[in-house]
Image (tube, grey):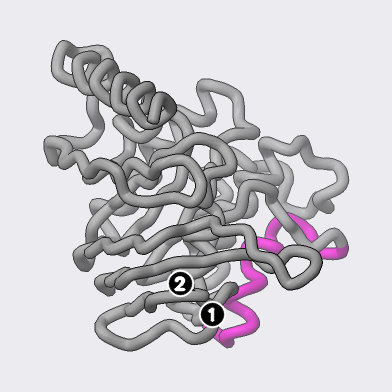
């Protein structure tokens, strides 16, 4: 398990004529080893940029990101990012897409059995030899999720990964993800703009402001998983979070 420490993190994208577009502003956050943190914010507030900085795909324009007190300077196989879009390799079938990262790292230990397990978990039986262009978007995203999880990453980063899925599949995968987290104890940062999804999967919810994003609120949730988000406590929390967003938008 790995801990993550974000210290005075800021980021701006360059614009024309040497201008800057501020996206993140002075974010400080401690994520414990084995924690499951959901970053909740409106579309366009900088959540994806935040994940890309933790993954090492971007470099901060201010502040630092640390994993176990080592500053992140580049991507590493111990940190896996599930994107909004599947980004499968079109010339590889489902089995080979799932196994791609493991083969790159020469991680062949029980690989065939692990692939079979994830094929079953994601409901992809019968599609093992199919190429991505014949899959629906939802099925392709399930392949991408399996590809990220099969290598047992120490840090799993998720960028609204269930948006393309139907309600039943999304609910099932949310439940399976939390079960895998409880079993494997990886550290997870999950980005979403859905309050219900945040309440379903998160151990802690971090609410971002509008761009440039700052941490506005942090909410600790009861540890029991799976949760009934329709019970009185969860409904009250949902209303509270909605009010917090209203206050953010009114500022």
Whether 142 is drawn above or below 195: the answer is below
Q: Position of residue 65 (x, y in %)?
A: 37, 75
Res 228 seen here: no
Displayed quadrant of residue 246: top left
Q: Is residue 103 left or right of residue 117?
A: right
Q: Tell me the residue that label 2 is attached to.
A: 79
Question: Residue at position x 51%, y 46% from top?
Answer: 211
Q: Which residues are magenta?
A: 91-108
Is residue 89 rendered magenta in the image? no
In the rendered image, which quarter is residue 174 located in? top left
Badge 1 crowding class, 10 Å Cα cut-off, few under 14, some 14 to 19, many 20 or more, is some
Residue 239, by quadrant, is top left
Task: Identify the residue at image location x=69%, y=48%.
Answer: 85
Quadrant containing the C terminus in the rendered view:
top left
Q: Nearer the viewer, residue 233 or 115?
A: 233
Q: Quadrant of the N terminus?
A: bottom left
Name the dominant secondary structure of the magenta segment: helix
Residue depicted at 36% across the width and 71% down the height? 154
Residue 5 seen anywhere in this rendered image of the structure: yes
């Amino acid at each position: 398990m790995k801990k993550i420490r974000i210290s005075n993190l800021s980021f701006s994208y360059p614009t024309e004529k040497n201008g800057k577009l501020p996206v993140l502003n002075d974010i400080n956050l401690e994520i414990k080893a084995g924690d499951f943190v959901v970053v909740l914010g409106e579309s366009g507030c900088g959540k994806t940029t935040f994940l890309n900085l933790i993954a090492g795909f971007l470099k901060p324009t201010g502040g630092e990101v640390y994993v176990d007190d080592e500053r992140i300077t580049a991507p590493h196989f111990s940190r896996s990012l599930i994107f909004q879009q599947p980004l499968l390799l079109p010339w590889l079938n489902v089995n080979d897409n799932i196994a791609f990262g493991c083969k790159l790292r020469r991680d062949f230990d029980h690989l065939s059995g692990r692939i079979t397990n994830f094929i079953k978990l994601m409901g992809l039986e019968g599609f093992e030899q199919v190429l991505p262009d014949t899959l629906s978007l939802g099925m392709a995203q399930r392949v991408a999720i399996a590809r990220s999880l099969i290598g047992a990453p120490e840090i799993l980063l998720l960028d609204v990964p269930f948006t393309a899925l139907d309600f039943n599949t999304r609910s099932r995968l949310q439940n399976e993800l939390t079960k895998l987290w409880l079993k494997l104890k990886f550290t997870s940062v999950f980005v979403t703009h859905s309050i219900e999804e945040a309440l379903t999967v998160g151990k802690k919810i971090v609410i971002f402001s509008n761009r440039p994003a700052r941490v506005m609120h942090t909410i600790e949730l009861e540890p029991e998983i799976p949760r009934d988000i329709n019970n009185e406590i969860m409904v009250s929390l949902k209303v509270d979070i909605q009010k917090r967003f209203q206050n953010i938008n009114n500022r």
